[in-house]
Each structure stands twice: as structure tokens, then as C-alpha cells.
Image (cartoon, helix red, strand yellow):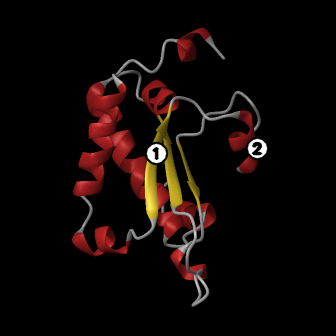
Amino acid sequence: MSTAARSYPQLPREEFETLIIEALADLPVYFQEQLQNIEVLVDTWPANTELRSVGLDSGHLLLGLYRGVPLTSRTSGYQLVAPDTITLYQGPIELVSRGDYERIRAQVKHTIIHEIAHHFGISDDRLRELGAY
């Protein structure tokens, strides 16, 4: 990990979590209502296993990660399952935002929306096509 990366995160975890709550509250009601059986988590940095799970090598930045069964893949057999998770990684988000609070806020919102898109079954390739990357 680079020297710059070691200096992040800087915000208190509670403050970062508040930015996530605000981003979720800003979603249109329709999307809020579709977030069923999903939990949003915060971690400081992704583990190497998490990086590899999305095809990244150690040292690459991962801002968020969706794990679960997208809504488009759920069938009538989708019952009694553990919640899907969206994990936001505070260190990388603050690093790409250069520690600027407003940039962090914007990046948290962008990352939440990106991961929720995966919950709706939208792939990274499709997000690139839409210019949402």
C-alpha cells in the first residue's frame, strides 16, 4: 500500500456512515422500496480476496462491492436467504476524493448508486455503455 493510501481513511467512521445514510435517503422512493433483504456495510479497505473476486490484483482500488442475488435472477425459490450486501470501502473512496469532503460525499453517492445498479441486475459492461462509470 502506498504512503498516500496509508493516510486514509481520515473521516470518523460515523461521519462516513452518515454520508451513506444521506445517499440512500436521496434515492427516489421507487428504488428505496426495491431494496429488500439488502444490507449496506462499511469496511476500511478491501481484502485481496475481494479484489480477486472482481478480477483485480492487489494494489488496485475497489470502492464498493455488491454480493448477492440480483433482483433479475431471483425466482420463487428465493426464500430464507441471508441478505445481499453492498460494502463501501472508506479508504479508497477518500483516496480518490483526495480527502475533500464534498468529493467524498459525491463519491459515496455515486458508489451506492453503482452497487444498487448491480442489485437490479445491471452489469459493469452495461454501466459503461450507459456512461455511468
Q: Nearer the viewer, residue 125 or 56?
A: 56
Position of residue 29 measured from the top left corner of the image (x, y, whole percent)? 23, 71
Classed neighbour count for the residue bearing mark 1: other residues with Cα under 10 Å, few (<14), some (14–19), many (≥20) = some
Rendering quarter of residue 82: bottom right
Q: Secondary structure at mark 1?
A: strand
Position of residue 72 measured from the top left corner of the image (x, y, whole percent)? 55, 81
Residue type at the position of mark 1 = Leu
In this rendering, is residue 17 above or below 11?
below
Residue type at the position of mark 2 = Arg
Rendering quarter of residue 34: bottom left
- Disc 2 or 1, which lies upstream in sequence? 1
- Tell whether 90 sits left or right of 124: left
In this rendering, is residue 91 above or below 116?
above
According to the picture, the residue beneath numbered tag 1 turns out to be 41
- Tell whether 24 sits left or right of 93: left
Whether residue 70 is visible to the viewer of this picture, yes or no, is: yes
Position of residue 1 measured from the top left corner of the image (x, y, whole percent)? 66, 17
Q: CA distance from mark 2 to mark 1?
A: 19 Å
According to the picture, the residue beneath numbered tag 2 turns out to be 52
Classed neighbour count for the residue bearing mark 2: other residues with Cα under 10 Å, few (<14), some (14–19), many (≥20) = few
User: CB atoms at circles 2 and 1 under 8 Å apart?
Assistant: no
Rendered image: mark on residue 4: none
Residue drawn at x 51%, y 46% is: 87
- Tell whether 91 sits left or right of 108: right
Give the total number of marks visible in the rendering: 2
Q: Nearer the viewer, residue 17 or 100?
A: 17
Report the mark closest to the observer, 2 or 1: 1
Residue drawn at x 49%, y 27% is: 91
